């Protein structure tokens, strides 16, 4: 069978952009999958949704927009007037690259035509390139791809590199397409993806081994799964109402969520983004080896930076631990970390994903040994619950979690089984653009466009702007970070790939005709940068709408 041309994937992307029906999109995906060879399936599936490697895979391309444009500039004759004209007619980096090549390319694409496997193997080589002169080597590899790529293929190469597909096909829709193509129930496809964390592997097994192959999916040690997520509740009364009083309360710690995998003396720790952070937390590794009673386990907990008296330190101190690659021992002494466990997903070979929360907690208590558990209470009354929440505030923590006692663990799901109640109104939002500042902030990107995730479309929709909350040093750092994510500009606004997540405090949610989201935050200010969260972990438009409606339980509504 002939290898599938990369042009097939690019043309499929164009079809997606012209298709609005979810059913029709799934049908296009199914037809595409059926034409692939087994060897092509994993990479083709991931590339189609803008991924190169599984989320838990530590490899990354680390190719900047500047590097992409350096290669494109070497292939085109594009004076400033042409670049401005192309920029005015395009909405993202991929379209910009395509437009420049269409109107300024010096030579047509060279042979042989690219295949899907050519592209994937080249990306593997780019990701493996490091050390001195790595930038030049990466650009040379990228040039080899773009010299062979058609203008349309170059558009999608850029989109994949920059993780900005914008064609409406998310991982969730891809799972529906896999189910359609393989004849396997979509619930089984989703379940396998939750357990394996690789939509490419799920597609391969579904297409080659069908229902029997996916039914065998289980948790795997040292293969982290996406964390179960929580919705925001307005107050304790809402939590009691939603969970019919069958709930446990836990301190919501101001730390970083971690997933711990242990098999004997081998311990690996993963962040909520599924990145391996074991090297940054040797003290946590030592604690698990010494105190955990279970020899084989997958646990969840919160790592909290503390002072000499054991009181929690601000979040940014913990992030110094996570970012540090060298001189770890000195940093451990400078910023000690306490681990607080709160969930058990696997204990000594037994999966607990489908066990109710109460049973998982009991298993965790037995397996924890002398390890710390998060403060927890099963309240009998609202008064007990409120007192527990106040105790969390006095102890320096940011709020409480309310968890339904009968709820199973749903990886990657933001359901109603877990609710977070914070002491202040806040949301985790994504920076999608920034304006150049003036006056004292001249030279910095300092007015940030804040967006929620629309769970139904996968888009990030702006709900406000703010320049408040950061120090001068943080403005400078954020400017450098956002420029590295830039994909286009509109006058004094730099549009960036949605990667940076910030916690935003606000006073009120208002209707807005200015934003497509239809809502805007009043008096928004940034509380902190959430380096522990990826854009998929941002709060959703659906959550914001629900919070907006809740305001009218104690306010009048203008008619």
Image: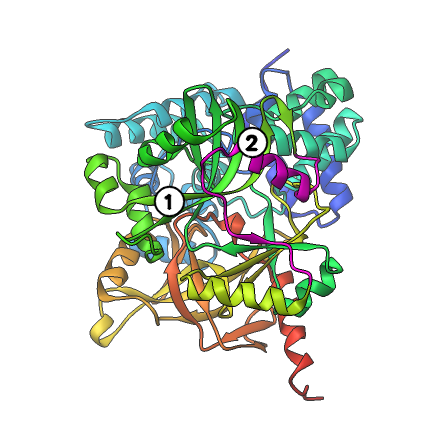
Label 1 environment density (alpha carbons within 10 Å; few <14, some 14–19, many ≥20): many
* Residue toward you, 396 or 460: 396
Ranked by sequence position, the earlier of labels 1 and 2 is 2
Q: Which residue is mark 1?
A: 338
Residue 304 coordinates in the image, percent (x, y): 38, 49
Instruction: Find out whether residue 451 is within the magenta segment.
Output: no
Name the quarter where the N terminus is drawn: top right
Name the quarter where the C terminus is drawn: bottom right
Residue 332 visible? yes
Residue 480 coordinates in the image, percent (x, y): 27, 53
Instruction: Find out whether residue 371 is within the magenta segment.
Output: yes
* Residue toward you, 421 or 92: 421
Dots 1, 2 in contact, CB < 8 A: no
For the residue labelled by badge 2, is the local secondary structure a helix, a strand or a loop? helix
Q: Name the side, left or right, on which 556 lies relative to 159.
A: right
* Residue toward you, 97 or 423: 423
Q: Name the side, left or right, on which 212 lies relative to 545.
A: right
Q: How is the image coloured?
A: rainbow
The stretch of residues the image draws in magenta is: 353-380
Residue at horizontal 63 percent and vertical 38 percent from the top: 362
Q: Which residue is mark 2?
A: 46
* Residue toward you, 100 or 485: 485
Total numbered badges shown on the rendered structure: 2
Q: Is residue 46 above or below residue 213?
A: below
Location of residue 436 (image quadrant): bottom left
């Amino acid at each position: 069978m002939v290898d599938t041309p990369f042009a097939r994937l690019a043309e499929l992307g164009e079809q997606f952009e012209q298709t609005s029906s979810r059913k029709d999109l799934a049908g296009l995906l199914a037809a595409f999958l059926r034409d692939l060879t087994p060897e092509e399936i994993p990479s083709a599936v991931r590339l189609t949704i803008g991924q190169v490697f599984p989320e838990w895979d530590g490899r990354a391309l680390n190719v900047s927009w500047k590097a992409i444009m350096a290669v494109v500039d070497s292939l085109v004759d594009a004076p400033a007037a042409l670049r401005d004209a192309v920029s005015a007619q395009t909405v993202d980096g991929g379209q910009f690259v395509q437009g420049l090549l269409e109107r300024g390319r010096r030579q047509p694409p060279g042979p042989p035509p690219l295949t899907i496997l050519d592209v994937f193997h080249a990306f593997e080589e780019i990701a493996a390139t490091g050390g001195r002169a790595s930038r030049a080597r990466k650009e040379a590899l990228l040039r080899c791809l773009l010299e062979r790529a058609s203008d349309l293929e170059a558009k999608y190469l850029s989109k994949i590199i920059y993780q900005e597909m914008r064609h409406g096909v998310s991982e969730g829709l891809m799972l529906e397409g896999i189910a359609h193509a393989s004849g396997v129930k979509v619930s089984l496809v989703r379940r396998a993806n939750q357990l394996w964390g690789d939509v490419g592997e799920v597609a391969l097994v579904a297409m080659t081994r069908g229902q029997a192959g996916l039914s065998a999916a289980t948790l795997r040690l040292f293969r982290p799964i996406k964390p179960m997520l929580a919705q925001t509740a307005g107050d304790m009364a809402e939590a009691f109402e939603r969970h019919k009083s069958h709930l446990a309360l836990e301190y919501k710690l101001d730390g970083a969520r971690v997933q711990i995998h242990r098999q004997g003396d081998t311990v690996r720790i993963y962040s909520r983004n599924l990145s391996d952070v074991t090297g940054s937390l040797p003290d946590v590794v030592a604690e698990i080896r010494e105190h955990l009673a279970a020899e084989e386990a997958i646990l969840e907990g919160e790592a909290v930076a503390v002072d000499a008296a054991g009181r929690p330190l601000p979040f940014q101190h913990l992030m110094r631990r996570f970012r540090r690659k060298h001189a770890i021992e000195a940093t451990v002494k400078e910023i000690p970390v306490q681990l607080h466990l709160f969930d058990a997903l696997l204990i000594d070979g037994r999966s607990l994903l489908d066990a109710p929360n109460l049973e998982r907690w009991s298993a965790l208590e037995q397996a924890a040994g002398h390890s710390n558990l998060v403060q927890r209470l099963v309240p009998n009354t609202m008064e007990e619950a409120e007192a527990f929440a106040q105790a969390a505030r006095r102890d320096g923590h940011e709020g409480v979690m309310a968890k339904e006692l009968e709820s199973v663990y749903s990886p990657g799901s933001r359901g109603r089984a877990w609710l977070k109640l914070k002491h202040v109104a806040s949301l985790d939002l994504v920076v999608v653009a920034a304006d150049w500042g003036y006056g004292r902030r001249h030279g910095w990107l300092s007015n940030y466009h804040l967006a929620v995730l629309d769970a139904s479309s996968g888009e990030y929709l702006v709900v406000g702007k703010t320049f408040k909350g950061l120090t001068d040093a943080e403005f400078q750092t954020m400017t450098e970070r956002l420029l590295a994510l830039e994909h286009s500009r509109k006058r004094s606004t730099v549009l960036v790939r949605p990667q940076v997540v910030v916690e935003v405090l606000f006073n009120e949610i208002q209707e807005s005709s200015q934003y497509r989201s239809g809502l805007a935050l009043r008096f928004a200010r940034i509380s902190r940068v959430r380096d522990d969260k990826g854009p998929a972990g941002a709060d959703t438009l659906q959550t914001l709408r629900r919070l907006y409606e809740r305001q009218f339980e104690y306010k009048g509504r203008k008619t």
